[in-house]
């Protein structure tokens, strides 16, 4: 019972969603948005699970003085600060438990939560994201090597598109006559993006789509149940 | 000489960092081929007579500032060069600050331009398309005052401006909805005011079809590259050009890395064969 | 005071920016500190964000406003509480109900969405007359589009050993995949460099005032 | 001269044709839209359409400058009658036309018939093959290179006494890729339990955390090593995309896992993970159906499961007849797609677009 009832539930919900696509009549037409709304609410409760896991893990490391425990303490403190600030004075236009905190905003220039967001969270996030600029360079250096036909194709198209995207491409082949304009590097890059690239991308989409349709079908029918734990 | 993989990576990172930072500090000003889309925008502003009043709408927030702010600055500067008077509006709440920043920047080149006479910031209004529709009937009703709380009728440059029809051109710098499309659908299609503008490189392909025979959009600046083209047209070595320089250098550098990687691989293969 | 706090904020942001960059050299105390602060701050950020933007408007405000009119919202609320029962080993099994409902929903929606937009729409987008293009390069492109898609899909055909004649289309499929990977890689370089430019602008302009 | 004649004729015939304004219930929908269409004299300068609301007032719904056009009025109530008024301005006078329509709520979206049929064909094929596999029919699957590495990776980790890192993507449970990833995780956890190698699973979402814990625990029980299961090795980091990545980077640098697995849905962070992992010298296997991120995995990882290979993986690993059958069903789908494309292209060349329209109508 503990096992089969969840599977039956998944089946019923799945079938209702499928039906609702083809039945425009009430109540079916509202079902999907209702379920999506429920999904958000359930996930909203569930986020606490993660936070508790996070606190427990960090507390554990600190209590047992595991290596680097000081940093985990810093993490826990920043978690607590951000949470308390958010709950007490709210974020942006939303007031918190203590109202809008106009006094503290006047002193800080923003709500404490927003101040931390702006000056700590944002730069951390943006800088981590910007590491990609370095990694894309090191990956290109290492991987774009003439080896086999496949890796050559990878490298050559990458080089053409890299050149074609900036003014360098225009400078290099701008002198080509009109009749050869196809070979002008920016044009060539556009051609690659538009045809062979999109052909392969779509092929990936189509086959992965089939995989997703098949997996979904197996889930609805209760054949695929590993998400509940175990295989069988 | 062989370097460890760790050292190699560190060299790559350092060189890239310097290569991107240098052109930002010491701009080069590489000129690019100007696309037709940019040229159309330029000609529209260039050919508008003096003393006409125009609208630049700031329909974005800081997340797309890198691309759109240089466009705003360049367009305002161009309007100032041609002695046109600029109204700033915003369909996005954060657009008001973006407009203030853009004016501050351009005023540093043209200190004699005055608020109320040469430019005004009317601020943000909620509602998107409906608001534009209402501006078509009466600007004053939508904006009883500017963002400094000066009443509409007390602003000298707005004395003869009543509705959208009195505006020479509208430029929307747009990173989503509401934005350039809404301006086009109402101001251009209903009131026949030329609408132009700019958007991010990612969304540009979706708007290019509107730059057609009917001039639904009067040209379009798509992304940083177009912004740098525009700067070169008005002869300003501005932020978009320096950023584009940094881009070009970084691209070149990556090509150099690929070449070095191949030379290294070729050598080690040869070494193994021997 | 505001001014002092703003300057402090910029220095804080600069400190975190440099700490993350330092990771490129090697792991170090600054990165370790920033990493943990980042994890902590962001976890709390999303918790607060979800409380204010989902839980309050979609659930609590509605229930407080009109309890009986929104009584159906008690269902997700109860399911959400059942999720939390995981915390206790004895009641852990209860969380299977909300999970299975959510996965059932997901499966239904994905099945429809992917069938529609990733299969049918892509198939119809390929049903073109390749010779209708007005230039030679257009016709060549259209032919490539069709061949690439067919061989690309065939590459993923699992129930045949790819030997002899069956290897040919699959090989062509790989070529297309490789061209596409190279193109996507090259196309992304610009966007990634922009991110770095953004950070350097912050450091050089807002923090150090080297550029105006 | 000829052109002039044609023009005069054209104007004449248009003057003859009556101005028309038609409102009709939008077919096969939830009864909340009305299709309006009009055809007026070419002299028309402006057309404006208004709807009569429940208080009897006129509300603007559409404006146009076209003499012939159509518009769909959305967001109405089902099973109600709506009255519309069209005002056309001509050069020197104007015209008012009035019409009405009743919205009808339907029980079947007929235009999606093609969609339904193809979905049914595909589902039946998958079910048929699953059934056949259950009956004991043996299906062949070709080698998937990325998966042969799994044993190698676990072996290497065991040898070095270092852990294995498994990242189940950065999407929540509402992405089928995450679920496919959990299925692969279940096999990997079982193997690592057998080899007694530590397995670290950081999760971005609480729901994924819940499911992953369950999956890993079951796998250890199945391998007969429930004592080796460490609950703290499956943990949550943060809901934030880059915060999560920062955390994983830290783990890779400090725990130095000998093998990294990135399976599931990944976005921009794919390259940050793969390059950091490469720098720590781990043997790396990635798999995603996110077409835009594949290049970065292909370039930086030792093995990559491309697109559908991610979904085929669990069938390949488990040799479970039901999953093999399902995979065979997907292959049937691929043949169907290839065939449809070929027929569609041939028909298009011949100038027939019926098949395309039938499927496209279904997809709209």
Image: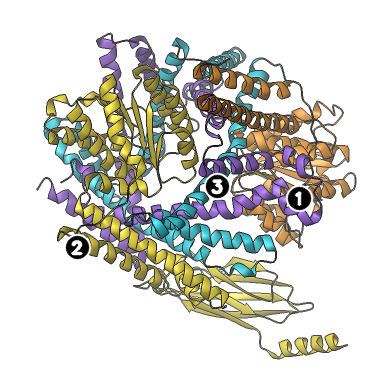
Image quadrant assignment for residue D288: top left
Residue B76 versus residue C120: which sits nearer the camera? C120
Image quadrant assignment for residue D283: top left
Q: Check disc 3 and report its element: helix, strand or loop.
A: helix
Please give left or right for residue D277 compared with residue D165 in the image: right
**Badge number at residue C57:** none
Q: Residue furthest left?
A: A1
Host chain of mark 2: D
Q: Position of residue D172 (x, y in %)?
A: 35, 40
Please tell me which residue is depicted at 77% across the width and 44% down the height of the picture: A173
Residue D85 versus residue C20: which sits nearer the camera? C20
Host chain of mark 3: C
Neighbour class for label 2 at 10 Å: few (<14), some, many (≥20)? some
Please give left or right for residue B113 compared with residue C56 in the image: right
Q: On the image, numbered disc 3 is attached to which residue?
A: C179
Q: On the image, numbered disc 1 is attached to which residue?
A: B37
Please tell me which residue is depicted at 47% across the width and 74% down the height of the picture: D355
The reply to whether discs 1 and 2 touch (Cβ–Cβ < 8 Å) is no
Image quadrant assignment for residue B56: top right
Q: Colour of chain D?
A: yellow
Q: Check disc 1 and report its element: helix, strand or loop.
A: helix
Disc 1/disc 2 C-alpha distance (Å): 60 Å
Q: Colour of chain B?
A: orange
The chain coloured cyan in the image: C
Residue D160 versus residue D336: which sits nearer the camera? D160
Neighbour class for label 3 at 10 Å: few (<14), some, many (≥20)? many
- Residue B149 appears in the rendering: no
Q: Colour of chain A?
A: purple
Host chain of mark 1: B
Residue D119 versus residue A82: which sits nearer the camera? D119
Q: On the image, numbered disc 2 is attached to which residue?
A: D132
């Amino acid at each position: 019972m503990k096992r089969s009832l969840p599977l039956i539930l998944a089946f019923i919900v799945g079938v209702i969603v499928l039906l609702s696509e083809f039945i425009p009549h009430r109540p079916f037409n509202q079902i999907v948005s209702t379920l999506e709304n429920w999904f958000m609410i359930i996930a909203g409760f569930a986020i606490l699970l993660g936070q508790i896991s996070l606190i427990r893990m960090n507390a554990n490391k600190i209590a047992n003085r595991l290596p680097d425990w000081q940093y985990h303490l810093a993490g826990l403190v920043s978690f607590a600060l951000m949470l308390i600030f958010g709950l007490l004075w709210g974020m942006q236009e939303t007031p918190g438990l203590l109202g809008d905190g106009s006094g503290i905003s006047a002193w800080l220039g923003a709500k404490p939560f927003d101040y931390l967001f702006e000056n700590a969270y944002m730069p951390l996030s943006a800088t981590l994201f910007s590491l990609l600029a370095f990694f894309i360079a090191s990956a290109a250096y290492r991987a774009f090597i003439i080896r086999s036909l496949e890796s050559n194709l990878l490298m050559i198209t990458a080089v053409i598109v890299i050149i074609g995207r900036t003014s360098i491409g225009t400078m290099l082949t701008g002198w080509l006559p009109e009749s050869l304009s196809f070979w002008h590097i920016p044009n060539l890059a556009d051609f690659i993006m538009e045809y062979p690239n999109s052909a392969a991308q779509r092929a990936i989409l189509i086959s992965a789509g089939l995989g997703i349709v098949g997996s979904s079908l197996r889930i609805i029918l209760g054949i695929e149940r590993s998400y509940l734990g175990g295989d069988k | 000489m062989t370097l460890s993989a760790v050292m190699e990576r560190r060299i790559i990172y350092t060189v890239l960092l310097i290569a991107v930072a240098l052109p930002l500090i010491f701009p080069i000003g590489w000129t690019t081929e100007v696309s037709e889309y940019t040229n159309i925008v330029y000609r529209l502003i260039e050919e508008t007579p003096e003393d006409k009043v125009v609208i630049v709408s700031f329909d974005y927030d800081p997340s797309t500032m890198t691309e759109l702010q240089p466009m705003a600055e360049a367009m305002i500067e161009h309007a100032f060069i041609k002695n046109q008077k600029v109204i700033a509006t915003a369909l996005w709440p954060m657009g008001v600050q973006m407009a203030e920043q853009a004016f501050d920047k351009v005023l540093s080149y043209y200190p004699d331009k005055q608020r109320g006479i040469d430019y005004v910031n009317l601020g943000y209004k909620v509602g998107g398309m409906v608001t534009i529709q209402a501006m078509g009937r009466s600007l004053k009703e939508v904006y009883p005052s500017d963002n400094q709380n000066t009443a509409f009728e007390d602003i000298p440059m707005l004395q003869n401006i009543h509705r959208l029809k009195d505006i020479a051109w509208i430029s929307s710098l747009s990173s989503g909805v509401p934005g350039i499309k809404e301006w086009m659908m109402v101001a251009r299609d209903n009131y026949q005011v030329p609408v132009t503008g700019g958007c991010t490189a990612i969304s540009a392909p979706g708007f290019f079809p509107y730059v057609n025979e009917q001039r639904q959009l009067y040209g379009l600046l798509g992304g940083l590259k177009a912004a740098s083209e525009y700067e070169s047209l008005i002869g300003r070595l501005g932020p978009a050009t320096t950023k584009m320089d940094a881009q070009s250098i970084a691209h070149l550098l990556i090509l150099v890395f690929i070449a070095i990687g191949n030379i290294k691989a070729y050598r080690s293969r040869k070494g193994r064969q021997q | 005071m505001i001014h002092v706090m703003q300057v402090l904020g910029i220095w804080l942001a600069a400190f975190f920016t440099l700490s993350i960059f330092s990771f490129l050299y090697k792991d170090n105390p600054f990165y370790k500190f920033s990493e943990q602060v980042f994890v902590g701050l962001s976890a709390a950020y999303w918790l607060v964000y979800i409380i204010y933007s989902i839980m309050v408007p979609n659930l609590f405000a509605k229930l407080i406003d009109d309890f009986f009119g929104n009584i159906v919202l008690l269902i997700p609320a109860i399911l959400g509480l059942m999720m939390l029962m995981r915390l206790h080993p004895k009641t852990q099994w209860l969380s299977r109900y909300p999970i299975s409902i959510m996965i059932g929903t997901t499966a239904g929606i994905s099945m429809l969405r992917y069938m529609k937009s990733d299969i049918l729409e892509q198939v119809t987008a390929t049903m073109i007359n390749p010779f209708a293009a007005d230039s030679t390069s257009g016709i060549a492109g259209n032919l490539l589009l069709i061949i690439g898609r067919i061989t690309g899909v065939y590459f993923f055909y699992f129930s045949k050993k790819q030997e002899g004649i069956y290897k040919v289309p699959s090989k062509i499929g790989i070529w297309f995949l490789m061209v596409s990977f190279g193109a996507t890689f090259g196309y992304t370089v610009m966007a990634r460099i922009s991110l770095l430019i953004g950070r350097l602008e912050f450091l050089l302009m807002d923090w150090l005032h080297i550029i105006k | 001269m000829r052109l002039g004649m044609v023009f005069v004729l054209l104007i004449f015939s248009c003057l003859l044709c009556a101005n028309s304004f038609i409102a009709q219930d939008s077919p096969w929908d939830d009864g909340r839209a009305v299709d309006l269409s009009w055809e007026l004299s070419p002299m028309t300068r402006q057309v404006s359409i208004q709807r009569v609301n429940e208080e009897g007032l006129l509300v603007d719904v559409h404006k146009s400058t076209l003499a012939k056009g159509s518009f769909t009025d959305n967001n109405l109530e089902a099973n109600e009658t709506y009255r519309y008024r069209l005002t056309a301005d001509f050069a020197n006078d104007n015209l008012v036309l009035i019409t009405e329509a009743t919205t009808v709520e339907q029980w079947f979206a007929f235009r999606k018939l093609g969609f339904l049929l193809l979905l049914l064909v595909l589902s039946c094929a998958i079910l048929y093959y699953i059934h056949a596999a259950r009956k004991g029919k043996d299906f062949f699957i070709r080698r998937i290179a990325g998966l042969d590495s799994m044993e190698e990776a676990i072996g290497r980790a065991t040898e070095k006494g270092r852990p294995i890192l498994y990242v189940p993507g950065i999407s929540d449970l509402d992405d089928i890729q995450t679920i496919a990833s959990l299925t692969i995780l279940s096999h990997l956890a079982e193997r690592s339990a057998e080899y007694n190698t530590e397995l670290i699973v950081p999760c971005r979402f609480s729901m994924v955390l819940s499911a992953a814990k369950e999956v890993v625990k079951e796998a250890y029980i199945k391998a007969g090593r429930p004592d080796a299961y460490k609950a703290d090795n499956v943990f949550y980091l943060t809901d934030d995309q880059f915060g999560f990545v920062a955390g994983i980077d830290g783990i890779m640098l400090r725990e130095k896992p000998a093998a990294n697995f990135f399976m599931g849905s990944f976005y921009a962070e794919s390259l940050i993970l793969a390059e950091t992992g490469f720098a720590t010298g781990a043997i790396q296997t990635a798999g995603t159906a996110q077409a835009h991120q594949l290049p970065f995995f292909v370039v930086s990882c030792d093995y990559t499961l491309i697109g559908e290979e991610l979904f085929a993986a669990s069938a390949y690993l488990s040799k479970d007849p039901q999953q093999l059958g399902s995979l065979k069903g997907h292959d049937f789908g691929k043949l169907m797609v290839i065939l449809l494309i070929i027929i569609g292209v041939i028909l298009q060349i011949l100038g027939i677009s019926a098949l395309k329209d039938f499927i496209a109508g279904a997809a709209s």
